[in-house]
Amino acid sequence: MDLLLALVVGLAVYGAIHGIRMYRADAKLPGDLAVALESGSSRTGAVGSGIDRLGIRWAPMVLRMMGPKAVNKKRRQIDLAGNPGGLTIDRYAARRAVYGALGLLGAFSMLLQGQLFLALLMIAFGLFWVEAGIWSAIRVRREHIERTLPDFLDVLAVVVSAGLGFRQALDRVAEKYEGPWSDELRITLRQMDMGVSRRQAFEELRRRNDSEQVAMFVTTLQQGEELGAPIVETLIQIANDMRRTDAQNARRKAAKAVPKATFAVTSFLLPGTLVLLTVGFVYGADVDFSFLTGG
């Protein structure tokens, strides 16, 4: 059994090395992946870059198996995640191919040893490891944007009230921030510089972000522009509405946490405390339990 396992691992290592050599010899990188590997090399670790290069030969096959509808849905999820580590749809497919192969290989090895549960874990790893990274990036990015947005709007309102136009103020304030929201603003400003209307640029901003606060910001800004409302008052109103929404969400989460805390206390903490008190009382009373053992 050990000899068979060593043979399987050896074949896997040989296949990986051979695959890298074949890739370097004649595989051609897609356009968006070539750009991502160049511009995102500092954002992606050596392991991630190696996995991308190893699996790129099978990326077109993975995309064909997914189908156009699933590919478009996954591309949107990658956009919502902010392309973490320079991730593109081709790099996603390459990683799915590599992790899927590793998961199947690991599951086969575990089955040879009779470890059914570990085999299922390896299959789950191959299927969902890349997905888990994207879901986590989407959640973290949305939370970061929603924390940043109210303070950003306050600063933007101050700069606009000082006399700068909205476009110039947006550019000035965006330079002072770092993170996902700053990246989104730079994309929006770049689109406006290329001739895209302000309305369309902000519509694209809303499309790229799965956030209620971003949608509120874009909707209120466009409504204020249509109605001719002063931009400073509009920005302050948006910031106040966002903080009010955050407070309501916090109260809602706290209300949901109370039953969970009560259940934990009544199910675990209270019985444990009663047992501890009872044992301490009996031990302090020096009760003789010899009659239970017949001594």
Image (cartoon, helix red, strand yellow):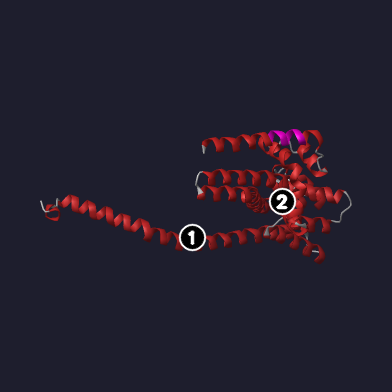
- Position of 229 with respect to 287 (left or right) is right
Residue 198 screen position, x and y as percent: 83, 56
Q: How many marks?
A: 2
Between tags 2 and 1, which lies in front?
2
Question: Closer to the camera, 13 or 290?
Answer: 13
Q: Which residues are magenta?
A: 16-22
Is residue 95 in sight in this rendering? yes
Residue 78: mark in rendering: 2
252 relative to 12 in the view: left or right? left
The residue depicted at 61 percent of the width and 34 percent of the height is: 10
Instruction: Please state which amino acid type lies under the numbered disc 2.
Output: Ile
Q: CA distance from mark 2 to mark 1?
A: 31 Å
**Residue at which label 1 appears:** 257
Neighbourhood count class around disc 1 (C-alpha, 10 Å): few under 14, some 14–19, many 20 upward:
few
Any mark on residue 105, and which?
none
Residue at image position (37%, 60%) is 267
Which amino acid lies under the numbered mark 1 shown in the image of this protein?
Answer: Ala
Query: Does 224 appear above or below 290?
Result: below
Residue drawn at point x = 58 percent, y = 45 percent: 108
| Viewer-side residue, 25 vs 241 | 25
- Which percent across, then down, holds residue 16? 68, 36
Per the image, is 17 magenta? yes
In this view, the residue farthest toward the left is: 295
Instruction: Identify the residue at the far right of this view.
Output: 195
**Disc 1 element:** helix
Dominant secondary structure, magenta:
helix
Q: Nearer the viewer, residue 160 or 32?
A: 32
Q: Earlier in the sequence, mark 2 or mark 1?
A: 2
